[in-house]
Image: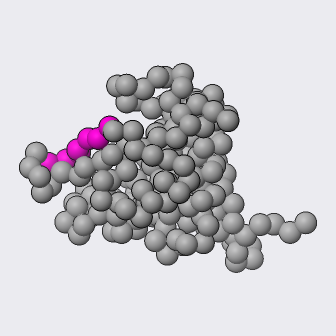
Amino acid sequence: MTAQPHSVRLALPSEAAGIAAVQRRSWTQLYDEPVAARLLDGSDLASMTGAWESAIRRPPLATLRVLVAIDSSEPGRHRVVGFAAVGPSDDPDASPAEDGVVAEFAIDPLAQRHGHGSRLLQACVDTLRADGYTRATWWVRSTDDPLRGFLTVAGWAADGAHTEVGGEDDESGIRFVRLHTDISA
């Protein structure tokens, strides 16, 4: 049996630098230049790597998990091409026993459109379900039509909740809408 060139699994501490690098590259795709620059200037790669390594080694909750999408298409080499962090939802209206959340999710811009996102999404749902959650939620930027479309096709829908993160004026804040899906079956 031959090894699959692409997979998703729990992250290893040694992959923290790869996760941080993917996260930084994804910011340049996800956010407008001023926001991306502010995020990149405020977080250096070493600090981000340390934070991810800590989250993998010593998660603050037993049900907080970091997953990685791996590309092993080059013989003898595997690289992180995406990651996700899942766990219990901390939304004020969440049920701790029922609601899980996809808190972070990114696919390297250079590795998109190769099925990594679909595999990672399925692993997120499987992981949340295995931890006993029956509903999954995900906060998506209100302007991220590609991600919202991807999730809608996969059975997610807006539930009416929304929030804004960042600035106090209309120009610097980032608006989010919450999507959800039933994962009980």
Residue 45 drawn at (x, y percent):
39, 60
Q: Is residue 171 magenta?
A: no
Q: How many marks?
A: 0
Pick the front one: 138 or 26: 138
Residue 87 visible at all: no
Direction from residue 133 to residue 89 in the image, left or right: left
Instruction: Residue at 25% x, 49% y: name it.
Output: 175
Residue 153 drawn at (x, y percent):
53, 57
Pick the front one: 181 or 140: 181
Farthest residue toward the left?
A: 169
Residue 91 visible at all: yes
Pick the front one: 48 or 127: 127
- What is the quadrant of the C terminus in the image? top right
Instruction: Residue at 40% x, 68% y: name it.
Output: 25
Write down the region rendered in magenta.
Answer: 161-167
Residue 169 drawn at (x, y percent):
9, 49
Instruction: Residue at 59% x, 55% y: name it.
Output: 120
Residue 98 drawn at (x, y percent):
54, 26
Picture quarter containing residue 78?
bottom right
Q: Is residue 162 magenta?
A: yes
Direction from residue 81 to residue 161 in the image, left or right: left
Q: Main secondary structure of the magenta part?
A: strand
Farthest residue toward the right?
A: 1
